[in-house]
Image (tube, helix red, strand yellow):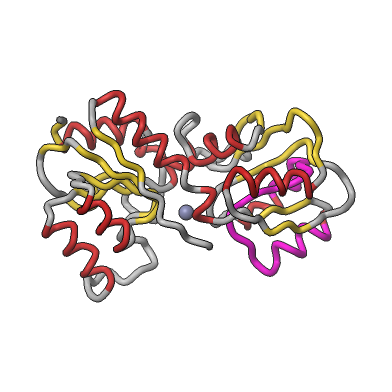
Protein backbone atom coordinates (compact mmCIF):
# COMPACT_ATOMS: atom_id res chain seq x y z
CA UNK A 1 0.00 0.00 0.00
CA UNK A 2 1.27 3.48 -0.82
CA UNK A 3 0.02 6.97 -0.15
CA UNK A 4 -1.52 8.54 -3.27
CA UNK A 5 0.65 11.65 -3.05
CA UNK A 6 3.76 9.53 -2.59
CA UNK A 7 2.84 7.54 -5.71
CA UNK A 8 2.34 10.81 -7.55
CA UNK A 9 5.66 12.36 -6.59
CA UNK A 10 7.58 9.10 -7.17
CA UNK A 11 6.14 8.69 -10.68
CA UNK A 12 6.44 12.37 -11.60
CA UNK A 13 10.14 12.27 -10.66
CA UNK A 14 10.75 8.96 -12.38
CA UNK A 15 9.35 10.30 -15.67
CA UNK A 16 10.91 13.74 -15.15
CA UNK A 17 7.67 15.49 -16.10
CA UNK A 18 9.04 19.01 -15.43
CA UNK A 19 11.14 18.74 -18.59
CA UNK A 20 8.09 18.63 -20.88
CA UNK A 21 5.72 21.18 -22.32
CA UNK A 22 2.83 18.91 -23.19
CA UNK A 23 -0.69 19.04 -24.66
CA UNK A 24 -2.23 17.64 -21.49
CA UNK A 25 -1.39 17.74 -17.77
CA UNK A 26 1.07 15.01 -16.74
CA UNK A 27 0.57 13.33 -13.37
CA UNK A 28 -2.56 13.08 -11.22
CA UNK A 29 -5.56 14.24 -13.28
CA UNK A 30 -8.46 13.00 -11.15
CA UNK A 31 -8.02 12.42 -7.40
CA UNK A 32 -9.42 9.30 -5.76
CA UNK A 33 -8.75 7.47 -2.47
CA UNK A 34 -5.68 8.48 -0.49
CA UNK A 35 -4.19 4.97 -0.32
CA UNK A 36 -3.33 2.82 -3.30
CA UNK A 37 -2.90 -0.97 -3.38
CA UNK A 38 -3.94 -1.91 -6.89
CA UNK A 39 -3.06 -0.06 -10.10
CA UNK A 40 -4.49 -0.72 -13.53
CA UNK A 41 -2.57 0.47 -16.61
CA UNK A 42 -3.88 0.94 -20.14
CA UNK A 43 -3.20 3.05 -23.23
CA UNK A 44 -6.30 5.28 -23.10
CA UNK A 45 -8.69 6.18 -20.26
CA UNK A 46 -11.73 5.07 -22.27
CA UNK A 47 -15.02 4.08 -20.64
CA UNK A 48 -14.25 0.42 -21.38
CA UNK A 49 -10.91 0.61 -19.60
CA UNK A 50 -12.48 2.37 -16.59
CA UNK A 51 -15.25 -0.23 -16.34
CA UNK A 52 -12.64 -3.00 -16.42
CA UNK A 53 -10.60 -1.14 -13.77
CA UNK A 54 -13.65 -0.93 -11.48
CA UNK A 55 -14.17 -4.67 -12.02
CA UNK A 56 -10.50 -5.34 -11.18
CA UNK A 57 -10.73 -3.38 -7.92
CA UNK A 58 -8.31 -0.62 -9.01
CA UNK A 59 -7.42 2.22 -6.65
CA UNK A 60 -5.67 4.11 -9.43
CA UNK A 61 -5.60 3.94 -13.22
CA UNK A 62 -2.48 5.00 -15.11
CA UNK A 63 -2.70 5.76 -18.84
CA UNK A 64 -0.77 7.29 -21.73
CA UNK A 65 -3.82 9.14 -23.09
CA UNK A 66 -5.62 10.82 -20.20
CA UNK A 67 -7.93 13.85 -20.21
CA UNK A 68 -7.95 17.67 -20.48
CA UNK A 69 -6.17 18.05 -23.83
CA UNK A 70 -5.37 21.59 -24.93
CA UNK A 71 -7.55 21.53 -28.03
CA UNK A 72 -10.66 20.04 -26.40
CA UNK A 73 -13.61 21.82 -24.84
CA UNK A 74 -13.07 22.29 -21.08
CA UNK A 75 -16.68 21.50 -20.13
CA UNK A 76 -17.58 18.19 -18.52
CA UNK A 77 -20.50 16.71 -20.38
CA UNK A 78 -21.46 13.63 -22.41
CA UNK A 79 -18.68 11.08 -22.83
CA UNK A 80 -16.33 13.05 -20.59
CA UNK A 81 -18.95 13.34 -17.84
CA UNK A 82 -19.59 9.59 -17.88
CA UNK A 83 -15.88 8.78 -17.69
CA UNK A 84 -15.15 11.21 -14.86
CA UNK A 85 -18.30 10.13 -12.99
CA UNK A 86 -17.10 6.51 -13.10
CA UNK A 87 -13.80 7.52 -11.51
CA UNK A 88 -15.35 9.76 -8.83
CA UNK A 89 -18.15 7.32 -7.99
CA UNK A 90 -15.62 4.56 -7.30
CA UNK A 91 -13.04 6.88 -5.74
CA UNK A 92 -10.42 5.83 -8.32
CA UNK A 93 -7.53 8.15 -9.22
CA UNK A 94 -6.48 8.78 -12.79
CA UNK A 95 -2.87 9.46 -13.75
CA UNK A 96 -1.99 10.52 -17.30
CA UNK A 97 1.56 10.52 -18.68
CA UNK A 98 1.93 11.60 -22.28
CA UNK A 99 5.25 12.83 -23.72
CA UNK A 100 7.26 11.84 -20.61
CA UNK A 101 6.10 8.26 -21.16
CA UNK A 102 7.05 8.35 -24.84
CA UNK A 103 10.53 9.62 -24.08
CA UNK A 104 11.74 7.77 -20.95
CA UNK A 105 15.02 6.02 -21.91
CA UNK A 106 14.05 2.65 -20.34
CA UNK A 107 10.33 2.60 -19.65
CA UNK A 108 9.23 4.82 -22.53
CA UNK A 109 7.10 3.78 -25.50
CA UNK A 110 9.97 4.37 -27.91
CA UNK A 111 12.54 2.50 -25.82
CA UNK A 112 10.22 -0.50 -25.32
CA UNK A 113 9.14 -0.65 -28.97
CA UNK A 114 12.73 -0.40 -30.23
CA UNK A 115 13.78 -3.28 -27.96
CA UNK A 116 10.84 -5.44 -29.08
CA UNK A 117 11.65 -4.85 -32.75
CA UNK A 118 15.36 -5.64 -32.33
CA UNK A 119 16.63 -2.12 -33.02
CA UNK A 120 19.68 -0.93 -31.08
CA UNK A 121 19.14 2.73 -30.33
CA UNK A 122 21.81 5.35 -31.12
CA UNK A 123 19.80 8.03 -29.35
CA UNK A 124 17.07 10.57 -29.92
CA UNK A 125 16.12 11.97 -33.34
CA UNK A 126 16.76 15.57 -32.38
CA UNK A 127 19.40 16.27 -29.76
CA UNK A 128 18.81 20.02 -29.74
CA UNK A 129 15.20 19.43 -28.81
CA UNK A 130 14.92 19.08 -25.01
CA UNK A 131 11.77 17.00 -25.23
CA UNK A 132 12.64 14.96 -28.31
CA UNK A 133 10.65 11.75 -28.26
CA UNK A 134 11.69 9.92 -31.46
CA UNK A 135 14.69 7.58 -31.63
CA UNK A 136 17.14 6.44 -34.29
CA UNK A 137 19.10 3.19 -34.37
CA UNK A 138 20.17 0.18 -36.38
CA UNK A 139 19.02 -3.35 -37.06
CA UNK A 140 21.58 -6.12 -36.45
CA UNK A 141 20.97 -7.44 -39.97
CA UNK A 142 19.72 -5.43 -42.93
CA UNK A 143 16.16 -6.44 -43.84
CA UNK A 144 13.94 -5.75 -46.81
CA UNK A 145 10.88 -3.59 -46.14
CA UNK A 146 8.69 -6.70 -46.48
CA UNK A 147 10.78 -8.76 -44.05
CA UNK A 148 10.83 -5.95 -41.49
CA UNK A 149 7.08 -5.43 -41.99
CA UNK A 150 6.60 -9.12 -41.26
CA UNK A 151 8.51 -8.75 -37.98
CA UNK A 152 6.48 -5.69 -36.97
CA UNK A 153 3.25 -7.58 -37.67
CA UNK A 154 4.34 -10.54 -35.55
CA UNK A 155 5.54 -8.46 -32.60
CA UNK A 156 2.53 -6.14 -32.49
CA UNK A 157 -0.06 -8.70 -33.64
CA UNK A 158 -1.29 -6.18 -36.20
CA UNK A 159 -0.49 -5.94 -39.91
CA UNK A 160 1.36 -2.65 -40.58
CA UNK A 161 0.86 -0.42 -43.62
CA UNK A 162 4.08 -0.37 -45.67
CA UNK A 163 5.02 2.45 -48.04
CA UNK A 164 8.05 1.69 -50.17
CA UNK A 165 10.64 4.40 -50.70
CA UNK A 166 12.69 2.31 -53.16
CA UNK A 167 14.57 -0.99 -53.39
CA UNK A 168 17.08 -0.45 -50.59
CA UNK A 169 17.21 -2.67 -47.49
CA UNK A 170 16.66 -1.29 -43.97
CA UNK A 171 19.63 -1.00 -41.67
CA UNK A 172 19.31 2.43 -40.08
CA UNK A 173 15.81 3.23 -38.88
CA UNK A 174 14.12 6.06 -37.01
CA UNK A 175 10.88 5.58 -35.06
CA UNK A 176 8.41 7.46 -32.91
CA UNK A 177 5.28 5.85 -31.47
CA UNK A 178 1.75 7.21 -31.87
CA UNK A 179 0.74 9.94 -34.28
CA UNK A 180 4.24 11.12 -35.23
CA UNK A 181 4.12 10.55 -38.99
CA UNK A 182 5.09 14.24 -39.43
CA UNK A 183 8.66 13.42 -38.36
CA UNK A 184 9.30 11.48 -41.57
CA UNK A 185 11.20 14.40 -43.10
CA UNK A 186 13.39 14.65 -40.00
CA UNK A 187 14.11 10.92 -40.33
CA UNK A 188 15.11 11.49 -43.95
CA UNK A 189 17.44 14.36 -42.93
CA UNK A 190 19.12 11.98 -40.48
CA UNK A 191 19.81 9.56 -43.32
CA UNK A 192 17.50 6.79 -42.09
CA UNK A 193 16.58 4.01 -44.55
CA UNK A 194 13.13 3.80 -42.99
CA UNK A 195 10.85 5.55 -40.54
CA UNK A 196 8.19 3.92 -38.38
CA UNK A 197 5.33 5.56 -36.51
CA UNK A 198 1.77 4.66 -35.57
CA UNK A 199 -0.43 6.58 -37.99
CA UNK A 200 -0.22 7.71 -41.60
CA UNK A 201 -1.36 10.85 -43.46
CA UNK A 202 -1.89 11.34 -47.17
CA UNK A 203 1.30 13.40 -47.44
CA UNK A 204 3.42 10.85 -45.53
CA UNK A 205 3.19 8.63 -48.60
CA UNK A 206 4.57 11.39 -50.88
CA UNK A 207 7.44 12.12 -48.48
CA UNK A 208 8.35 8.42 -48.43
CA UNK A 209 8.24 8.02 -52.21
CA UNK A 210 9.92 11.30 -53.14
CA UNK A 211 12.65 11.23 -50.47
CA UNK A 212 13.35 7.53 -50.91
CA UNK A 213 12.65 6.51 -47.32
CA UNK A 214 10.47 3.51 -46.43
CA UNK A 215 7.53 4.25 -44.15
CA UNK A 216 5.85 1.83 -41.76
CA UNK A 217 2.54 2.76 -40.10
CA UNK A 218 2.33 0.22 -37.29
CA UNK A 219 -0.74 1.52 -35.42
CA UNK A 220 -1.09 4.31 -32.85
CA UNK A 221 -2.48 2.03 -30.15
CA UNK A 222 -0.28 -0.92 -31.08
CA UNK A 223 2.95 1.11 -30.79
CA UNK A 224 1.96 2.69 -27.47
CA UNK A 225 0.99 -0.38 -25.44
CA UNK A 226 4.39 -1.06 -23.97
CA UNK A 227 5.48 2.07 -22.09
CA UNK A 228 2.59 2.20 -19.66
CA UNK A 229 2.92 -1.55 -19.10
CA UNK A 230 6.62 -1.19 -18.25
CA UNK A 231 5.78 1.73 -15.95
CA UNK A 232 3.16 -0.36 -14.12
CA UNK A 233 5.63 -3.21 -13.65
CA UNK A 234 8.26 -0.80 -12.36
CA UNK A 235 5.83 0.76 -9.85
CA UNK A 236 4.64 -2.66 -8.69
CA UNK A 237 8.22 -3.78 -8.09
CA UNK A 238 9.43 -0.61 -6.38
CA UNK A 239 6.37 0.31 -4.33
CA UNK A 240 4.91 -3.14 -3.65
CA UNK A 241 1.68 -2.55 -5.57
CA UNK A 242 -0.52 -5.00 -7.40
CA UNK A 243 -0.44 -4.18 -11.11
CA UNK A 244 -2.90 -5.28 -13.77
CA UNK A 245 -2.38 -4.23 -17.40
CA UNK A 246 -5.55 -4.19 -19.48
CA UNK A 247 -5.22 -3.97 -23.26
CA UNK A 248 -8.37 -2.70 -24.96
CA UNK A 249 -7.91 -3.45 -28.63
CA UNK A 250 -8.00 -0.47 -30.98
CA UNK A 251 -7.39 -0.94 -34.72
CA UNK A 252 -6.22 2.69 -35.20
ZN1 LIG B 1 -0.53 8.58 -28.47
Residue 71 in percent (x, y) is at: 39, 67
Residue 143 in percent (x, y) is at: 80, 39
Q: Is residue 172 left or right of residue 84?
A: right
Q: Residue at x 25, y 34 (%)?
A: 242
Place residue 85 in its image quadrant: bottom left
Range of the magenta residues?
A: 186-210
Q: Is residue 168 left or right of residue 191?
A: right
Place residue 75 in its image quadrant: bottom left
Q: Residue at x 62, y 56 (%)?
A: 181
Q: Is residue 181 left or right of residue 169?
A: left
Residue 197 among magenta residues = yes
- Establish if 227 lies above or below 145: above
Q: Nearer the viewer, residue 231 or 17?
A: 231
Q: Residue at x 63, y 62 (%)?
A: 200
Residue 118 in percent (x, y) is at: 65, 32
Residue 226 in percent (x, y) is at: 47, 41
Amino acid sequence: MVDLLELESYTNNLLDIKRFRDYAPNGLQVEGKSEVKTIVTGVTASQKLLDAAVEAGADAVIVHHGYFWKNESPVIRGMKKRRIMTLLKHNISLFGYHLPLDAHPELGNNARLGALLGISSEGVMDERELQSVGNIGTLADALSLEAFGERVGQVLQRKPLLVSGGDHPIRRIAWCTGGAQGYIDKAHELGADAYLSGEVSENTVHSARENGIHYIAAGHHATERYGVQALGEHLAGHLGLKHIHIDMDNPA
